[in-house]
Image (cartoon, grey):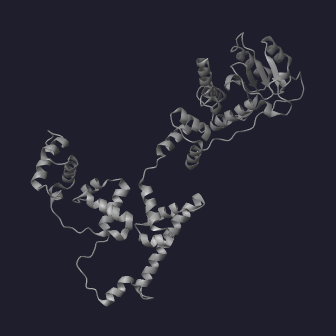
Amino acid sequence: MSKFNLHLKIEAIRQYLSGNEGIKSIAKSFGINHEVLRMWIKQYEYHGLKAFEKTYTAYSLPFKLDVLNYMNENGTSPNEAAVIFNISSPGVIRRWRSQFNENGIDALKPKIKGRHRMTDKNKKGLKKQVPAEGSVEALQAELERLRMENAYFKKVECLSSKQGKITKQDKAQVVYELRLEFPVVALLAFAEVPRSTFYYWVKQFDKPSLDTDLKLLIHSIYEEHQGRYGYRRIRDELFNRGHRVNHKKVQRIMKELGLKSVVRMKKYRSYKGTVGKIAPNVLDRNFLAEKPNEKWVTDITEFKLFGEKMYLSPVLDLYNGEIITYTVGSRPTYSLVSEMLNKAFKRLSSEDKLLLHSDQGWHYQMKQFRQALKGQAITQSMSRKGTCYDNAVMENFFGIMKSEFLYLHEFESVDHFKQELARYIDYYNHKRIKSKLKGMSPVQYRAHAQQVA
């Protein structure tokens, strides 16, 4: 920048301040780089004409550290720092930063100018000057060493309490953080970290994380589904959005972010012994259905709300896991099931040949229930006594519903609960994806299958 005289700089700045031309146009007319002109303008705005006065200042160590600390704390570039601190060239600051990163604080100390006469005494002391034992210098050196060890152990202890073990990367991070206070050479020797290892990790610290965008996306999906998704379902959702990511990587990132799917709870047992007729286990754990309305499962679950018991009775289609319909009541009466059944029948057509499976709950043994199924030509199936796995799909839904919805929300009233439950069922059917449905929601899967057919 020295080839441009003061008159040229002032004239270029004056033209810019007149507001008639842009920076690039003015820079082109003067034959200079537009970034150089931009820096002149900023220097003039900060310091006036004083910014262009020639100085032969030897910058002190505290001044250099102030500049680097300011850049680190405020995210300032060398160009901006050169303007703020009135330094002739940002290249000077880049050199300080490089020296500091490579050799620590010692590299920033001003060099003593001139040649020194080398005496025999000087030559001997050049190798290693050890202060005499008990001297002030020796005590000061010992105090500094103890201060360094104490600072190092504090940071290492903080890391070990979080991670359980300390790696070379962790040690390099501690040395990097303490480099402003203590010589890097001494820190590396104490930490037993090779120089090459330390500078390898220093370069990595400056690099942006390749997973930053992925972490934000995973966190966004997790929050969107209110913590209901585990790493497998988040992996599937990422795939739906065009991101092919291994499930193990998703699991690792979720662990780093502290994201964990909620825990499932137990269900209500409605078995009271034989009060009617028991149907055979026709389903026999064959939970696969080739088309909608071929196999349905149902059950009742119990939970507490406002200190009172509540009961939910849904019907689920095994073809795509869709909730066909449901009823909610404060008592597990037969009307809870009969109302649900009547609403579910509206989904059937004359061509459907349906199998309805349940446990041996007393509702499903009643004559009214069996006659209602017979009137629709529906085959009844029941789980074996005390064998919950025979109705595992329904059990699974109850666990998901309670962990994803019931225990994550606070409700103002029973009516408010019913409104939110309707929203959740709609979310479950239309938006919540499943791995076995090729990453689609139940309704999406059914619609996709109908389009293909």
Task: Tell whether 326 sits left or right of 180.
Answer: right
From the top left corner, tell me how far across and down residue 52 is, in percent: 16, 58
Quadrant in which the C terminus is drawn: top right
Residue in view at x 34 percent, y 61 percent: 97
Residue furthest out toward the left: 7
Quadrant in which the N terminus is drawn: bottom left
Task: Tell whether 404 sits left or right of 13.
Answer: right
Q: Is residue 62 at least partly visible in the picture?
A: yes
Task: Tell whether 396 sits left or right of 153.
Answer: right
Vertical comparison of 335 with 75: above or below: above
The one of 138 and 294 positioned closer to us in this rendering: 294
Q: Quadrant of residue 449?
A: top right
Q: Is residue 229 at least partly visible in the picture?
A: no
From the top left corner, tell me how far across and down residue 254 is, in percent: 57, 45
From the top left corner, tell me how far across and down residue 337 is, in percent: 77, 21
Residue furthest out toward the top: 350
Residue furthest out toward the bottom: 120
From the top left corner, tell me how far across and down residue 414 is, in percent: 67, 28
Vertical comparison of 122 with 258: above or below: below
The one of 291 and 325 positioned closer to us in this rendering: 291
Vertical comparison of 160 with 385: above or below: below
Q: How many marks?
A: 0
The one of 244 and 372 positioned closer to us in this rendering: 244
Vertical comparison of 355 with 217: above or below: above
Q: In which quarter of the image is residue 425?
A: top right
Residue in view at x 88 percent, y 23 percent: 278
